[in-house]
Image: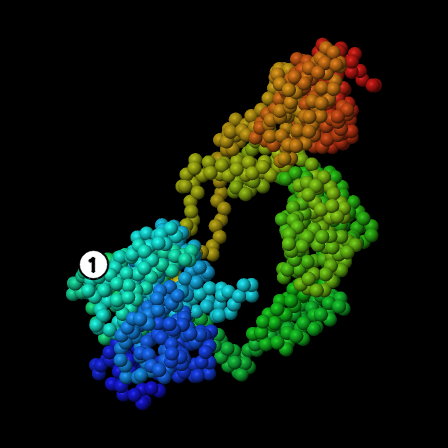
Amino acid sequence: MANAFVSRSTLSKTLRFRCHSYPCLSESSSSSTWRSAYRFLYQDSCRRNFATNLTQRYPRRTDIVGSPRWINRQNGKSNKESGDEEDGEGNLEETSERHNKPQSESSETKVRLSEDGGERASSSSAAPPSSSGGHGGDSGEGPSSSSSAPPPHRETTSPTSAISKQNVPENYPQVLALPIARRPLFPGFYKAVVIRNPAVVAAVKEMMKRGQPYLGAFLLKDEHTDSDIISDINSVHHVGVFAQITSIFSASGGAPKEEDGKEEGLTAVLYPHRRIKLTSLVTRADSTTTANIQDLSEGSKEAPFTPPPSPPTSGVEEVPSAEGTVSHAAVRTPPLQTSFLHNYPISIVNVDNLTAVPFNKDDQYIRAVMSEIVSVFKDIAQLNPLFRDQITNFSISQIATNVFDEPDKLADFAAAVSAGDVNELQDVLESLVIEDRLRKALLVLKKELINAQLQSKISRDVDSKIAKRQREYYLMEQLKGIKKELGMESDGKDKLIEKFKERAANLKMPESVHKVFEEELNKLMHLEPAASEANVTRNYLDWLTQIPWGQHSPENYSITHAKKVLDEDHYGLKDVKDRILEFLAVGKLRGTVEGKIICFVGPPGVGKTSIGKSIARALNRQFFRFSVGGLTDVAEIKGHRRTYVGLFQLPNDIRALRVDKIGRGINGDPASALLEMLDPEQNNAFLDHYMDVPVDLSRVLFVCTANVADTIPAPLLDRMEVLEVSGYVSEEKSVIADKYLGPQAKEAAGLKNADVQLEQDAVDTLIKYYCRESGVRNLKKHIDKIYRKAALKIVEDLGEEAFPEEKALNGDTKDTKTRTVENMEPAQAISSSSEEPKKEERTNVTTEERKPLDIPSTVHVRINSGNLKEYVGPPVYHKDRMYVTPPPPGVSTGLGYLGNGSGAVMPVEATSMPGKGSLQLTGKLGEVIRESAQIALSWVKSHAWELGISQDPAEQWLNERDVHVHMPEGSIGKEGPSAGTAIVSAFVSLLTKTKIDPDIAMTGEISLVGQVLPVGGLKEKILAAHRAGIKTILAPAANRADIEENVPESVKTGIRFVYVEDVREVLHEVFRDEPLAELLKERLPLDR
């Protein structure tokens, strides 16, 4: 080490010689300060030796960049004048400091010191670099400097180290403006920036070549932009720093691009000297104005620095002479110009220097704030090692002076090392009043302290948790080892293996499966319990032994028992019950049954899912329900750790699947995977991806449900046996409410033994005015609500005394922890949320079950249609028909099928007005129903004379009339072709001014030639017509068998059905009692 050979006095002198800004050392300096000085000297000596070796091996290389310091010496020619010297190939122009020595005939030595490459730490407080604004840097623009006297230089002890340190110009009116992103620069602290703009890069290189490495750095207001040119003066903050470029090097490490051979960019190390204010942006038109900068040597005491004169208007440089007159070459050092910057498309600005407001360093407020800043620095240094190093470097640089003598520098250092908000840092830079600057810097530093405290706390919490777990693990391992040595307990692996063997002994595994089981069991025996593979193998064996290999449920093929179970659970559903009985009859004769795929399709609430449970109870099989609606990942079926196979308890159970909403995603098509699982021809060897062994699913009865069959994938639908489950009629709903829903709701409300009755008229009112859906789910909700309201009414009327609490729970059960955290201070709340609770909070708990209370026999509650509103509110549906009396011409009555599975009576209204023969449709109509209206209007136009609308067959009277069709209740969407006959009737009624009987309703699709085509939903439509009191229904003849078979007789009672095949039959029936009937018989006669 260096301190073993160098005394303290020699060390201090050497440091002052090598680094002029290094503080003076004294005997009173601390030991840590002397150690830092020794370390600095040792590292500097190593760098110098390395640089010397480099220059000896590569004396003329200029592309070596990155060494901290190196010296390049080159012999010059004896007959060359100093003013005519070129820069030389061996010099680094980007990082040079020009040092001069008087001319001699023997040789010329050029010494250049390059600053550290890369970005320095922001807390570095080394002395500002010397300016390179020496002589001879502007060759080619002015006359040779050989006519003037050589510049003065400072004598040194070494003849080869004649270093001339230049002054930093005090006034620099026009400078290159470089916008800085993310955070501002502060005087006295290095900063490396990357310059990408080629024009700015070229300008910076020429500045370094001319010895004028000065620019202005200003912070961009928009932190997301990054530009090297200021296009708008308002895009940057006007207060910045006057900085010197100490060194530059290629941003790509000197490697040229492959395209044009140019470097990608430039990295410049800046050293800010002072604060400046941007006054104006100089445009290219102002290029005739130049700024002269007097460059004088700092080491010359005979030629003190003077501010430069005003820039001349001509291109000749004018400098005041010693006698006060203007001379072009009277001074020893010619002035330098910034006019060359106007040759580049860069940002040039006029700036003014900013100086701090005079202050008294002994002011009590200033000293107090500085003391607080130093205290905060100490706190941060204890928490953050990075800050500790930066503060140490700053403290070393301040050894020569008291830190309280430079409050401005302390404030800048506090802001420079803080990662605070950009605007707050800029406020510190713009503050010229020392008191405000210190206060703002303290605020930024305080926030940094809070962040450091939070980071330290998080780190401590994580370390404590990790240490606790490690300690627990270590103790548990010791405990296991002790018990194993004493023979008290094994590691648990033996017991686990025995458990798997016992499971496998009770199963009838196929030979291939048993082979896999033995292999996995043998693998588990040789694995350590802590190994990750052991956990995977254990889970696999667990699933493998849970599959019921060779086991099945005892089946019951009794037809009588099945009928009893199905009738107990469901009312109606004759087709579904018959299909289940057929399944049992085949199984009874064969002694076994194969798996089937039955799909129930119907509206919501008709009992599709519950019928699956009844089938399982009738067959004495286990029932499992899975919903594959919205499933997009095939791994959920073919194997994704927990799969369908892993959940099968018995191979002949019953599966209930929802298959109408399966989606195809990026992870495969689940519908295709279901084909393999559901198809009896393939599922006898279903291969799960996770288990990787074939499983027999051929005896499983799959029951699938869907609302509509259109959305089921076609290949899957082809393998299913589809059973249509239609909606319930009013009579069926009434029976279901009386036998099933009412007793269940009454027991659920705690009124099983109470005299609470729901009258029949109340049920009929619910069905007619509250619950018109095809299913009974909504009806169940209303009945549950009625009995809950009744229970509340009983308790409120009798009072709490009638129902005493035998063992009530006392005590405050509020969340005390939440209330405590809300009342804490923020710092306490944060700490308490992560620390372990010191004391468990007590809550009142009990294991005693409450007993139901008996309702007095004197309580009698009756719910009828009169008081029904008190329990369920006002009716939802007010009337079944819009028109009871004969409507005006242009109105007909149609039948529709709603999305909730119920039917509705829908009037069709039409009107006409003068126009161009167009058709307007309103009422939230779909595309299909719009097409039906177009077809109906076209048919009417083509038969206008036969219908009596026009007087002449060639007359085109309808081409001058616009027709508007509207279907009321516009908030309800309407779609489908079944309104074709109703729209035609409305058009004929409108154009012939003939009224239609409101007791006649119709449904059916029409073709362009007038044929009436079949439609769906006849049962629901006829039920709606029956409820509305319709007396005549016109239906397609093709739907006759469907109506006679599926519509109950109780619904058809009182309704006359007219089956039609042509639209002419519809018009003859609708207008048979009107004068128009005779005209229709004459011009549109029926074929039959």
Image coordinates for residue 199, horizontal then vertical, percent: 44, 59
**Quarter of the image where one finds residue 215:** bottom left
Is residue 924 something that shows in the picture?
A: yes
Residue identified by numbered label 1 = 357
Q: Residue at x 73, y 69 (%)?
A: 514
Image coordinates for residue 297, horizontal then vertical, percent: 27, 71
Q: Quadrant of the N terminus?
A: bottom left
What residue type is disc 1 on? Answer: Val
Q: Residue at x 33, y 86 (%)?
A: 2
**Quarter of the image where one finds residue 925:** top right
Q: Secondary structure at mark 1?
A: loop
Horizontal placement of 960 versus 234: left or right? Answer: right
Q: Residue at x 30, y 84 (%)?
A: 158
Image coordinates for residue 247, horizontal then vertical, percent: 39, 70
Image coordinates for residue 150, horizontal then vertical, percent: 29, 74
Is residue 739 something that shows in the picture?
A: no
> Front-most of 179 and 817?
179
Horizontal placement of 952 versus 25: left or right? Answer: right
